[in-house]
Image (spheres, rainbow, N blue to C red):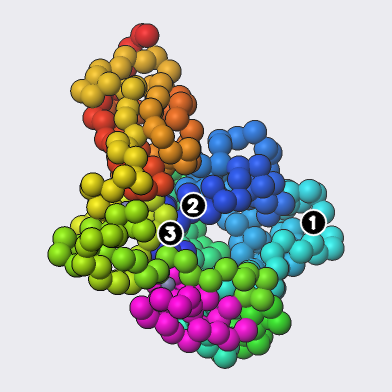
C-alpha cells in the first residue's frame, strides 16, 4: 500500500503502531499542546488515538491550521460572539508555538492532498474527514497554506443518522468553501529536510538492496532507516521451507527475495489471505519448537465479570509478543496483563517475533465475579 493511504483511510493498525512507538505519555502531551485534549487524565492513549475524545470543531480546525502554516500553532480567536476558550493554554491571539516540524507538515499535507510522494510541489486542497461512533458526527477539515475550513454535520440532540459520514456529509461543503477562498492554492517548496530519493514501493523507506520494487520518492534527512523487510533468504528448492546455516547442509538450496514483516503486520496480512514468510525447515535443530501458549483465558471459557476484565497469561519463549483481540492489534506486549473487554464472544490471538501464533476463543458475560 502506498504510504499516504493509511492516513487518508484512517487505518487503525497504523495508528496503533504509531502510538506504540511514541508512547502514551508523549502522545497525550502532544494532544494537550495541540488543544485537542483540554485536561490530561481522560481516556487512555489507545482509545484516544482511535478518536474517543470529544473535541470542539474550532480546536480541531486550529490544530489542522498549524499543519497548513508549516507547524506554528495559534489558539483560535472568535471574531464575534461565542467563547474562544483560549485554546489549551489560554493564549488566545497570543504568539505562535511550533507544534510540528515543517517536514512533518509537508508529509501530512502530501498525504491529505493526494500528491504523489516526491512531486516537486504539493497540489490541490488537503482534506481529512471523520465519522464518529454511531454516526453521530460527520466532520471535514480542508486546508491550503492560506486558509483552513472546518465543517461539522450532525444533530444538536446528538442522535446518529446513517447519512452522517464525514466524506459524504461534510467534505463537499468544506471543499466548496475552500475553493471560494483560495481557488488555486500555492504550496511552498518542500522544506530542506526532505529530498528526492529511491524508496521501497512497499515500505516507503530508503530502498534496500533486495526491495523488489523501487520507486522515485522522497527521503527525510533526519531518518536514515533503509527498508529491512525485503531480504534474500535461502529456501529448500523442493519444499520452499526457510533454511539457515544449521539446516542448509545436504539440501538443494534456492535463494529468494522474501518479505519479513514485523509479526503484527505479518498476522494482519495472513488474516487477509496474503502469503506470509514460509515456515522454517521443521527438522532444523536451531529453531526451538513451540510458539506461545495461552494459560488464560481458557479455550471456550465463560468469564463473568462485573468490571469487564479478563486476566491474560501466556507461556512463551519469545520476549516480544503481539496481541490481537478479534483481529485488532492491542498495545500490550507482556506475557501477563488484564484485558478490559466488552460482553460477548471474543478471539484473542498472540504472535511471537517468529510469527508463531496461538488463538483462544472465550466468552465474556455480564455479572458478578
Ligand atoms: Zn523493501
Ligand atoms: Zn534452520
Q: Which residues are magenta?
A: 195-219
For the point 36% across and 78% down, the residue is 212
- Which dot, 1 or 2, sits closer to the camera? 2
Residue 309 x, y percent position in the rendering:
41, 22
Q: Is residue 181 above or below residue 280?
A: below
**Left or right of residue 200: residue 35:** right
Q: Nearer the viewer, residue 366 or 261?
A: 261
Q: Is residue 5 above or below residue 298?
A: below
- Marks 3 and 2 sit apart, C-alpha to C-alpha, by 13 Å
Quadrant in which the N terminus appears:
bottom left
Residue contact between numbered discs 1 and 2, judged by CB atoms under 8 Å: no
Residue annotated with mark 2: 17
- Marks 3 and 1 sit apart, C-alpha to C-alpha, by 30 Å
Q: Residues within 10 Å of mark 3 (few under 14, many from 20)?
A: some
Residue annotated with mark 3: 10
Query: Is 202 inside the magenta-drawn segment?
Result: yes
Q: Earlier in the sequence, mark 1 or mark 2?
A: 2
Residue 149 x, y percent position in the rendering:
57, 69
Tell me which corner region of the image, top left, top right, bottom left or bottom right, holds residue 302. top left
Q: Residue furthest front?
A: 250
Numbered circle sitting on residue 92: 1
Q: Residues within 10 Å of mark 2 (few under 14, many from 20)?
A: some
Residue 163 appears in the picture as rendered: no
Query: Is 244 inside the magenta-drawn segment?
Result: no
For the point 25% across and 71% down, the residue is 254
**Left or right of residue 276: residue 201:** right
Q: Is residue 77 above or below residue 142?
A: above
Q: Nearer the viewer, residue 171 or 351?
A: 351
**Left or right of residue 333: residue 278:** left
Q: Nearer the viewer, residue 366 or 224?
A: 224
Tell me which corner region of the image, top left, top right, bottom left or bottom right, holds residue 304. top left
Q: Residues within 10 Å of mark 1 (few under 14, many from 20)?
A: some
Amino acid at each position: 500500500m502506498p504510504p499516504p493511504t493509511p492516513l487518508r483511510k484512517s487505518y487503525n493498525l497504523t495508528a496503533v503502531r504509531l502510538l506504540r512507538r511514541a508512547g502514551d505519555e508523549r502522545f497525550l502531551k502532544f494532544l494537550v499542546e495541540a488543544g485537542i485534549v483540554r485536561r490530561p487524565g481522560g481516556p487512555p492513549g489507545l482509545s484516544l488515538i482511535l478518536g474517543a475524545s470529544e473535541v470542539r470543531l474550532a480546536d480541531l480546525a486550529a490544530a489542522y491550521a498549524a499543519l497548513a502554516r508549516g507547524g506554528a500553532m495559534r489558539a483560535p480567536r472568535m471574531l464575534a460572539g461565542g467563547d474562544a476558550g483560549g485554546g489549551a493554554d489560554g493564549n488566545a491571539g497570543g504568539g505562535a508555538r511550533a507544534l510540528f516540524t515543517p517536514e512533518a507538515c509537508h508529509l501530512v499535507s502530501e498525504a491529505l492532498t493526494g500528491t504523489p510522494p516526491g512531486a516537486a510541489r504539493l497540489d490541490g486542497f488537503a482534506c481529512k474527514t471523520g465519522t464518529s461512533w454511531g454516526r453521530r458526527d460527520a466532520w471535514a477539515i480542508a486546508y491550503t497554506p492560506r486558509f483552513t475550513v472546518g465543517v461539522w454535520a450532525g444533530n444538536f440532540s446528538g442522535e446518529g443518522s446513517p447519512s452522517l459520514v464525514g466524506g459524504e456529509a461534510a467534505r463537499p461543503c468544506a471543499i466548496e468553501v475552500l475553493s471560494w477562498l483560495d481557488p488555486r492554492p500555492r504550496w511552498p517548496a518542500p522544506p530542506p529536510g526532505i529530498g528526492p530519493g529511491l524508496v521501497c514501493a512497499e515500505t516507503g523507506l530508503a530502498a534496500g538492496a533486495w526491495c523488489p520494487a523501487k520507486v522515485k520518492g522522497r527521503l527525510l534527512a533526519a531518518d536514515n532507516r533503509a527498508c529491512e523487510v525485503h531480504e534474500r533468504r535461502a529456501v529448500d528448492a523442493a519444499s520452499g521451507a526457510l533454511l539457515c546455516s544449521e539446516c542448509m547442509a545436504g539440501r538443494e538450496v534456492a535463494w529468494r527475495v522474501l518479505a519479513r514483516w514485523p509479526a503484527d503486520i505479518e498476522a494482519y496480512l495472513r488474516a487477509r489471505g496474503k502469503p506470509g514468510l514460509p515456515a522454517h525447515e521443521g527438522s532444523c535443530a536451531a529453531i526451538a519448537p513451540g510458539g506461545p501458549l495461552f494459560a488464560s483465558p481458557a479455550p471456550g471459557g465463560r468469564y463473568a465479570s462485573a468490571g469487564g476484565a479478563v486476566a491474560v497469561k501466556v507461556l512463551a519463549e519469545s520476549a516480544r509478543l503481539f496481541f490481537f483481540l478479534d483481529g485488532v492489534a492491542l498495545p500490550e506486549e507482556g506475557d501477563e496483563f488484564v484485558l478490559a473487554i466488552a460482553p460477548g464472544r471474543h478471539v484473542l490471538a498472540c504472535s511471537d517475533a517468529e510469527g508463531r501464533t496461538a488463538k483462544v476463543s472465550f466468552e465474556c458475560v455480564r455479572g458478578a465475579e
